[in-house]
Image: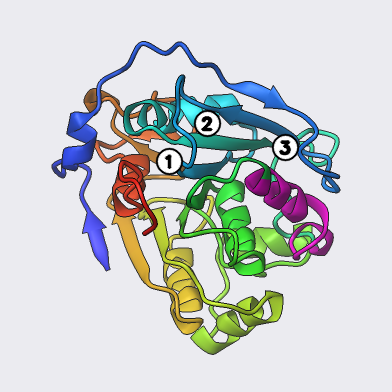
Amino acid sequence: MRKLLIGAVVSALVLFLSTPAQAATIRPVTGFGSNPGALQMYEYVPDELPSGRPAVVVLHGCTQDAAGYANGSGWVELADKLRFKLVLPQQVSANNFNKCFNWFQLGDSKRGSGEAESIAQMARYSAGSRTYVTGLSAGGAMTSVMLAAYPDLFSGGGVVAGLPYACATSMIDAYSCMNPGKDLTPRQWGDKVRAASTGARSPVSVWHGTADYTVAPMNLRELSEQWTDVGAAVDTHSVSGMGHGQPIAPGSGCGKAGPYLLDVGVCAAAELAAKWRLAEDGVQ
């Protein structure tokens, strides 16, 4: 397991960032599909973006919205600097009072139905040469859903303070998954993914704070075991002393601190962008 200390040196990619003058804006998109999960879609496309550039689906956490998380996590700055687009699903309070994606509801977490299918339709609508998915907390859990149910759509994923796929099937069950967490065997976790879909599995990065008392840190291990069991390449990042949230590094041009956006001197978004080679042309 790779451990990242709060005072660790930020990656060269983060140091390369500066806050650009943005002309593009986050804009709503309609007509992307049948939208069975009744989600909202937003998109960020840097000005004069060439066709065929990669796309990243970015899933916010509970109580957040698409624009706030995209900006606060550093993804907007990265999209401008490295020239790729963002697909930004947004939950609505009519679906979930706290605006959490419903990763724990069967109707929203399987291929072809509910919120999962709405997000898949957004990804297809805005697809680039490669498409990736990442998210925080409930958005991280929904990232697990998308990787499990739609392996054909995504070239990789990043789960931040999230949960294994199919850890819960109800809201009450979801709380026990979050804390204290569920300890299953790798095969048991893997069987849940195999039941969702077949096909090759893309690489998965897992990020978690060691002081996360909302989603227990043991979920990093359980996620790693789940995806390793189905053949995915997995890298884990345990951020020492960090609570529940997205690791950002505003001092290096990555993100803006706020609730669940935690300045720990480490930029998860930038490290994911580097791993996914989003600055490059061509297929990974």
Specify the quadrant that holds the N terminus: bottom left
Q: Earlier in the sequence, mark 1 or mark 3?
A: 3
Q: Main secondary structure of the magenta part?
A: helix
Q: Amino acid at mark 1?
A: Gln
Question: In the structure shown, which secondary structural element does the residue marked by tag 1 occupy?
Answer: strand
Q: Which residue is mark 3?
A: 91
Residue contact between numbered discs 2 and 3, judged by CB atoms under 8 Å: no
Instruction: Residue at 36%, 59% (x, y): give it.
Output: 284
Q: Which residue is mark 2?
A: 69
Residue contact between numbered discs 2 and 1, judged by CB atoms under 8 Å: yes
Q: Earlier in the sequence, mark 2 or mark 1?
A: 2
Instruction: Using the numbered discs, state the Cα–Cα distance from disc 1 to disc 3 in whole angstroms.
Output: 18 Å
Residue contact between numbered discs 1 and 3, judged by CB atoms under 8 Å: no
Among the 4 quarters of the image, the one containing residue 144: bottom right
Q: Is residue 65 visible?
A: no
Pair 2/1: label in front:
2
* Residue 13 pos. (x, y %): 22, 38
For the rendered model, the colour scheme is rainbow
The answer to if 116 sits in the magenta stretch is: yes
In the image: residue 182, left or right of residue 51 = right
Relative to residue 131, is residue 190 depicted above or below?
A: below
Magenta stretch, residue numbers? 106-124
Q: Which residue is mark 1?
A: 246
Q: Amino acid at mark 3?
A: Gln
* Residue 67 pos. (x, y %): 57, 25
Question: In the structure shown, which secondary structural element does the residue marked by tag 2 occupy?
Answer: helix
Q: Earlier in the sequence, mark 2 or mark 3?
A: 2
* Residue 234 pos. (x, y %): 38, 69
